[in-house]
Image (cartoon, helix red, strand yellow):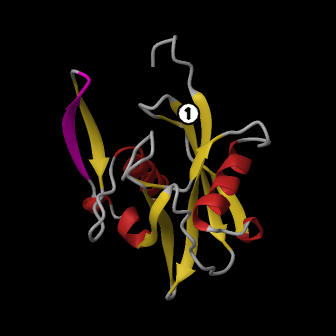
Amino acid sequence: MPPSNPLRPAGVLVPLIERGGALHVILTKRTSHLKHHPGQIAFPGGKVEESDFDVTAAAIREAEEEIGLPNGLVDVLGYLPPHETVSVFSMTPVVARIKSDFSLRPEPGEVEEAFDVPLAHLLDVENYRIQDRRWRGETRRYYVVPWGPYYIWGATAMICRVLADRLA
């Protein structure tokens, strides 16, 4: 990013939850009216607010706001490298185990839908493709890892791919 655009810190939660005897990752589909990444598949999370101690606190707070995840169920396991987004954020993925199941409650102002994907699907590097498109006069390449009707791409797919590579 150009120096005139300092990166703003953000945290996203990579929530791992056991369902049906297997680990799944909870993702969201953002509403279409949002300023940043409308309609895209994303991890729960957002920018660090003044009230947040750090990116971990921001990720956990945002997950509670966006999908109704009680913060007492979050057990932080670790972090993936920060990812710079085209919307000028330095986004830190916070990997966490969710201690028990809970009722997903998407916040209608930000989240159109919350769903989960089997971790095994995201860990299989054969499920990833690299695509490209023109954006602001440049060709940008990015990962995609489709799941059913969901087109998981960009920063979300990159984080999933980094997780897959780290756990391989």
Q: 117 or 64, which is in the foreground?
A: 64
Q: Quadrant of residue 60?
A: bottom right
Q: Indicate whether residue 135 is drawn in magenta.
A: yes
- Secondary structure of the residue carrying tag 1 is strand
Stretch of the chain drawn in magenta: 129-136
Query: Where does the image place residue 59, in percent across and percent down from the top left?
Result: 65, 51
Locate the C terminus and report the quarter of the image it occupies.
Answer: bottom left
**Which residue reaches farthest bottom?**
20
Judge from the rendering whether residue 68 lies leftward or rightward of residue 124; answer left or right.
right
x 49%, y 53%: residue: 166
Q: Amino acid at mark 1?
A: Ser
Q: Indicate whether residue 132 is drawn in magenta.
A: yes
Q: Alpha-carbon neighbours of circle 1 within 10 Å: few (<14), some, or many (≥20)?
A: many
Query: Where does the image place residue 10, in percent across and percent down from the top left?
Result: 60, 39
Judge from the rendering whether residue 93 lies leftward or rightward of residue 61; answer left or right.
left
Query: Where does the image place residue 80, in percent across and percent down from the top left?
Result: 56, 47
x 77%, y 43%: residue: 52
Q: Which residue is mark 1?
A: 90
Q: Quadrant of residue 85?
A: top left
Placement of 24 over or under 45, stated as above or below: below
Locate the N terminus and report the quarter of the image it occupies.
Answer: top left
Could you tell me what secondary structure mostly forms the magenta stretch?
strand
Query: Where does the image place residue 135, in percent across and percent down from the top left?
Result: 25, 29
Placement of 75 over or under 165, stated as above or below: below
